[in-house]
Amino acid sequence: MTTYKSVPATDRARYQQILDYAFSPAEEPSESVDSGPWPPDLFQPRGIYSEGSLQSTCKLYELRVWIENEQVEIGGLGGVATAPTARRQGRVRELCREVLSEYGDRGISLVTLWPFQTSFYATFGWATSHFAAEYCCAPGILPSYSVRGRIERMTAEQFERLQQVERSHGKRFNLSLHRTPQWWQSRTLSSWTGGTDPYLFGYHRDGEVRSYLVFTVTDETQTILNVQQLGYIDEDSYRAIISFLSNHGSQIEQIRLTLPERNTLFRRLNRPKKVTCKIKPGPMLRLTQASTINSLPVHIADTTTQVGVTDPVLDENNGKFTLNVSDGRLTLDKIDDDPESAPIRIRIGELSQLLIGARTIEELAREDNCDVRDDEALAALTGISDSRQVYHDEFY
């Protein structure tokens, strides 16, 4: 008999032990919960218990992101780990089911996570939200522009001056994180996994911060400037931070910079053949309980159709739903438990991608990721939420 519940302070050491074994050593960042308040300020610890012993762990975050120019509350799932003696017993599936149900009961429709392996979480209904382009080049490869204003180093305590930039920058993308003051100070502008806090520089013009860069400098086989976060309001403010990076040639051997997959950087480069570019997956996402979708902002005219949904984790999501859009708001209402009779059949992960604009219905149909049996139903879902790129770059 197993139990899913909040992890109490008495199991704090066991919780940390499971995380340490699962994530150390690892490429992904991990944080210690050995000290500080319990439960921690930024997340809620949850676990699966068997015979009173903590067997699996996770962290539940409540996040606010931009979707179609509006802030939407979503969940963030991190720190999923199972003790080595409890693996291969279905603990992660059980944990996913409980987490999705808890978020759904709170009225939260979407949950994101950063997977250690995409195929592993795909079996539980998650799907990749977007891809990103990671560039690596010598500083001098980047263009240098002449812009009015100045760039100055800033401190974490000045985060409030960045919020206007973050808002303007974030609204360009679906799923972009809207940071709370605590998130700015405890995550974005601090080394929450240990080590040295990142540098923060801001571009100032007319008395305002117009763009910012958050980065670290590491000495691996080369001295590398790793850009962790950036934000900008307009073209001049983007040029200012790119020029700032370009001017590091005497100090830095390589710049490592990640941007949304569709961006203009390559067209701006002096010698593009001298740049390496990797396309990397972003976080995965999925719907919690489909019935919680009752006012999701989307980008199409009013329409109504039916979709048949299949879900490998939550049985209540298996069935036929009415998908209705009215005044830019989407709702899902369950009709029955038979997904086969709907004009469009789709898995829960691909439906999640569709609703936030990560994939179009035409792409999903063309790649056999959904079954479209009716041209009118296909037309009803064309352009449902593809007015913006999807981009979510904050790790947790």
Image (cartoon, helix red, strand yellow):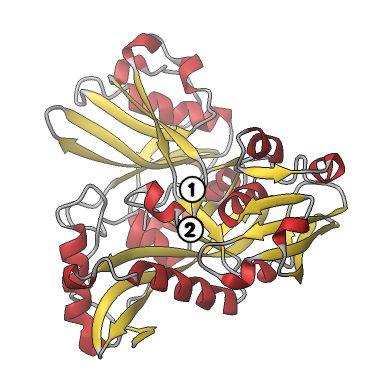
Residue at 62% of width from left, 38% of height from top?
A: 368
Q: Is residue 341 above or below residue 234?
A: below
Which residue is depicted at the point 75% across and 40% down? 383
Q: In front here: 175 or 367?
A: 367
Image quadrant containing the C terminus: bottom left
Q: Who comes first in sequence, dot 2 or dot 1?
A: 2
The secondary element bearing badge 1 is classed as: loop
Q: CA gap, disc 2 to disc 1?
A: 10 Å
Compared to 148, does 338 lie above or below? below
Verify CB contact (< 8 Å) between mark 2 and mark 1. Answer: yes
Say what amino acid the circle numbered 2 marks.
Answer: Thr
Name the amino acid type tagged 1. His
Q: Is residue 139 above or below residue 217?
A: above
Q: Residue 154: image x %, image y %?
A: 35, 48
Left or right: where 196 falls relative to 58: left
| 296 relative to 224 in the view: left or right | right
Q: Is residue 88 above or below residue 277?
A: below
Query: What x and y, as percent, mark residue 260?
Result: 50, 35
Q: Which residue is mark 1?
A: 392
The quadrant holding residue 89 is: bottom left
Q: Residue at x 64, y 39 (%)?
A: 364
Q: Residues within 10 Å of mark 2 (few under 14, many from 20)?
A: many
Q: Which mark is residue 112?
A: 2
Percent of width and height locating residue 153: 33, 43
Number of residue marks: 2
Q: Position of residue 71 (x, y in %)?
A: 63, 59
Q: Secondary structure at mark 2?
A: strand
